[in-house]
Every structure is written in C-alpha cells, then in structure tokens.
Amino acid sequence: MQQPWWKQSIVYQIYPRSFMDSNGDGIGDLNGITSRLDYLQQLGIDVIWLSPVYQSPNADNGYDISDYEAIMREFGSMADFDRLLAAIHQRGMKLVMDLVVNHTSDEHAWFIESRSSRHHPRRDFYIWRDPVDGHEPNNWGSFFSGPAWKLDPGSGQYYLHLFAPKQPDLNWTNPQVRQAVFDMMTRWCDKGIDGFRMDVISLISKPEGLPDAPVLPGELYGTPGICANGPHVHDYLQEMRQAVLRHYDLMTVGECAGVTVGEARKYANADGSELNMVFQFEHMSLDCPEGFKWSLSPLPLVPLKENLSKWQLELDGKAWNSLYFCNHDQPRIINRLGDPSPQYRERSAKCIATCLHLMQGTPYIYQGEELGMTNFPWSSVEEFNDLESINAFNELTQKGGWDPAVIFPMIAHKSRDNARTPMQWDATPQAGFTTGTPWLPVNPNYPEINAAEQLQRPDSVYHYYQQLIRLRHDSELVKYGHYELLLAQDPDLFVYRRYLETKQLLCVCNVSRQTRQFDLPGAFKGGRVLIHNLPELAAERGQLEPYEAYVISRTGE
Ligand code: TEU
Ligand code: CA
C-alpha cells in the first residue's frame, strides 16, 4: 500500500527568531533561513515546520498574531517568504506553517472591532462575559499565571484569555469565526504550503457553561486544562477537514495539551477524518510531579518507557504518532534525561536520539538538537525573555510564598528560553547567528558546540542524526514496524524490538551513567549493527558502557 509522505518524513522545527539573522539586527529572519537551507538538506530532513512568522506584537514571540496574512516586519516581507518557500520546494523539501487559532493578538483587527462595542457584529468573535458578583466569571487561571479573564473597562465585561491577556481566545462556537479561520487557511494552502502545525488545537472548544475548574496543588486558580478536548473539538476539526484540508495534500499535526491516547485516536484517526497526528504532553510531564512544571526532578526512565510504549502500542494501526523530546517550549533534553558534562554530552545526546528515532511515528528535530545543544546557564530573572518564566517567577515569589533563591534555579532549569537561545553555527562571535547583538544571549558553550565544528567531524552528533534519518528513510521496518518493549522495569536500559513480517530489529540504549551488563537476546546474535554511538565495540560482548546505544537487525525465515 502506498503510504502518505508524512509517515515517511522527518520534520525539522525552526524557531525563526533564533535560527539565523541575515541583517544584523539580532533577530533571526526569513532570509536567514533561506541562507541555511543547504545545511538542512545535508542533514537529510524532509519537512520544515516554521514557528509563527506572521505579523505580531510579540507578547509571546509570534504566538500572538495580529495579522494572519502578513509577515512579521522583523522577519522580512511576503516576497522573502515566497522565495523561502520556492527554495524549500526546489530542494525537494516541504514547509509546514504554524497555525495559531485558539487565540489571536489583542491587536488583531477582529479583537479591536470586538472590543469596540457590545453591539459590534464581531463582538461574538471572542468570549465575553459579565462580571459575577464584581469578579471574574469563573475561577480559571491562565497558562501564563494570573486569572484567565481580563476586564475591559469600556464595556464592563471580561474576555477570556487562556494564555496572556494579549492573547484573547476566539469563540469557536460562532460559525463566522470558523469560516474566517478556514478562509485564511485556504489562502495559505493556495500559496502552496504543505501543512499546518496547529497550536493548542485541543483547547478550542470550551466546556459548556464555562464551569469552575479544579485548583491543582500549589496553584492559585482553576486549571485552564479543563478546556482540553472540549465537547465540540472533534466536530470543528471534521468541519475543517471538509472545508479546507481535504482539498490539498497536507500534513497536519495538532498540538494537543491534555490529550490522552483515547482522544488521540480521534484527533489522528487513521480514517483521515481529522488530523494526521498529535503532539502529546504526557511523556514531557513525567518530571513535573503533581503537575508542578518547575520541579527539578529528572525524567524518570521507567515511567517514560511505560508512557512511550503505551502510545506506540495503542496507536499502532489506529492513528499515527509524532515523536519528540524537544521544541521551543521545552528545555533541552540533555539536561532532563541525559548528561551535559563534557564527558557524556555527545554520547547521551546520541543515546536519547536513538531511543526516539527508532520508534513508529514521525520524528521531529528541534533546531540545535542535532548538535546536542544544552540549557543556558541563567544567572538572573532579568535575562529571561519568555513571559511564562517571568510571570511564574513573579507570581510564585510574590503570592506563592517561594524564596527567590529556591525557585529561580527551578525556573532556570525548565524555562522555555533554554530552547530559544540562538542557533550555534560556528565559533565566531555570537556563534555566527548575527553580526549584531542577539535578542537572547548565545550559550557561552558555542566555541565547543557549533555546526561548523560538527560538520567536519565524522563522529559528531550532527552526523549521528544524519545516520538516524537515513536509517528511517531506507527501512520499512523502522517506519512501519510494530513495537514491543523489553525489560520494562529496568531503571537504566531502554530496550525495544520492532518487527514487520520476517524482519526485526532491537534498539538497545543504556540511558544511565552506569556500565551495565546486557546479554543480547539469542535471536539477534550475529545480526547486523545498523547504528552504534561508540566505535568498534561488539554488540555481543555482554556489557553496555554509560549512554551506549545501538540498533541491531535480523531477518528471519
Ligand atoms: O503551547 C501550549 C502549551 O500548552 C504549553 O507548552 C505552553 O507553552 C506552556 O508551557 C504552558 O505552561 C503553545 C505554543 O507552543 C507556545 O509557544 C505558546 O506560548 C502557546 O501555545 C500559546 O500560543
Ligand atoms: Ca534580522
């Protein structure tokens, strides 16, 4: 059976602000991306996902859009965009755009009109409510601290914002809102883009009657997570499929905060009625005990294996997985699951990549992940740009009773800004990202960790990713094989089997600093080693070095 291209693709996410600055203003831009396409082509990726490049006042770095059909001034022009798209297509790659339609910016024309009067025809484009006893209409908090409602003095009503006050939520129950979004999407599709990554699409349908939400431990407000997988979300996505998606050959991935495996089977149903795949969050929450994001606990391997294995098994044949550890909202994975010390940084980066890239699903690589980039050594809250980190620090110290000296390192460890420091291209000043002053500081480790150095060194993390990508492209087994976890309770080893007809492979990763004993199962003795992150060590020697990883294959009768 002919499989769709997005099941055979590896996606590379670009955060445009931090990728490459072409004009020295310290801000990455579209021409900068165009100038680095050869690097991506050489890596071997198929699809580029661009975080938002639309007009935005940048309260949340482009996730607050004031005009869906214009390019952010700092990033360039529509002509620059057209050139970028053409250059991507010329190289046989595809482009997926970020679609942020749970909310707009408060500077979007729709919101300006909506706010202008209770009687404006666009009033109902957003979610307005009267005060209740002089207070917010319910107890919901924002994902970015504080209440999820803001009073508009002009009309005396509150509007809902699950994220920042500058990100008012669209009212998806209004058919005119849906039509306006679908029309906008159609215009982008007609331009020739190849798909959408849909920002917090699981939140667009709010629960009937907007009831109070449970207050999680350590929180001050009801959880906005109550909006996940709401009553009409699947109706809206099916409508979107009919109105827009089915007319084009697209890849669609829904960012689905709060999604369960059961819900994912609907969003990403193999019948093609909604989206192609979702980003789930469960595996990235395992180092957030009781939902407390800022915890310093490491990602625990046994629950991580259990979780990823559940998704592998329960979506197989019914939906399709996305595979990711890194994006612009997540701190660097080496600092969560690997070891950033010089001794093990590269080896653990390769080990973690092996765990992920041998699974069934579409892998996502976030810029710099292919170099083993690490968290930034933050020393004060003034260095942060991200509103989530800044607001959390202020709220937790001012209202939450936290000692700043205790909470600061926790926020520094999990801050989204860790992923947003500039891409490290070479060892020249500012890592070759800009000739000016970068909008966020470059990680001081750029003289050791940078693309130029890794491109000329055959055993670099970059070349290991290149090999993992090639492995998937060349193998039906890697792409479509079934999955079975072995040694589920082992606290150090992540070992799984993939099988398809008579072919099978074993992925063996020691995700620890321990040297471990490991006997290769008999069926794989004499098998072919497909990839190995240590040179010249026999897979059959009965032992695994710290962070050693390899994949071995076997074709049976
Ligand atoms: O993120 C939504 C989301 O649920 C979280 O990952 C969020 O970033 C935060 O960590 C909640 O505590 C998406 C985008 O990826 C993110 O960059 C945006 O800030 C957000 O939506 C709002 O558009
Ligand atoms: Ca620039």
Image (cartoon, rainbow, N blue to C red):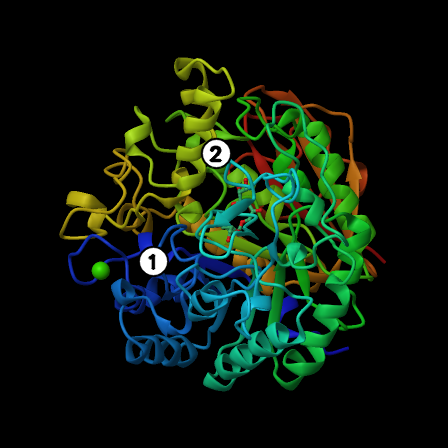
Residue beneath disc 1: 57
Q: Residue at x 29, y 76 (%)?
A: 80
Whether residue 423 sits left or right of residue 350 in the image: it is left
Q: Quadrant of residue 268?
A: bottom right
Element carrying mark 2? helix
Q: Residue at x 45, y 39 (%)?
A: 388
- What amino acid does circle 2 point to? Ile
The number of numbered discs placed on residues in the rendered structure image is 2
Of residue 306 and residue 255, the one placed in the foreground of this image is 255
Q: Quadrant of residue 255?
A: bottom right
- What amino acid does circle 1 point to? Pro
- Within 10 Å of disc 1 (Cα), the crowding (few <14, some 14-19, many 20+) is many
Element carrying mark 1? loop
- Within 10 Å of disc 2 (Cα), the crowding (few <14, some 14-19, many 20+) is many
Whether residue 117 sits left or right of residue 523 in the image: it is left
Where 88 sits versus 451, above or below?
below
Residue 439, x across and y down, in percent: 25, 47
Name, please, the residue furthest toward the right: 557
Q: Residue at x 55, y 72 (%)?
A: 195
Residue beneath disc 2: 334
Where 348 sits versus 3, above or below?
above
Q: Earlier in the sequence, mark 2 or mark 1?
A: 1
Residue 120, x across and y down, in percent: 52, 72
Where 390 sits versus 109, above or below?
above
Where 270 sits versus 503, above or below?
below
Residue 121, x across and y down, in percent: 55, 75
Q: Residue at x 55, y 31 (%)?
A: 337
User: Residues at badges 2 and 1 in contact (C-beta under 8 Å)?
Assistant: no
Q: Real-space Cα distance between discs 2 and 1? A: 32 Å
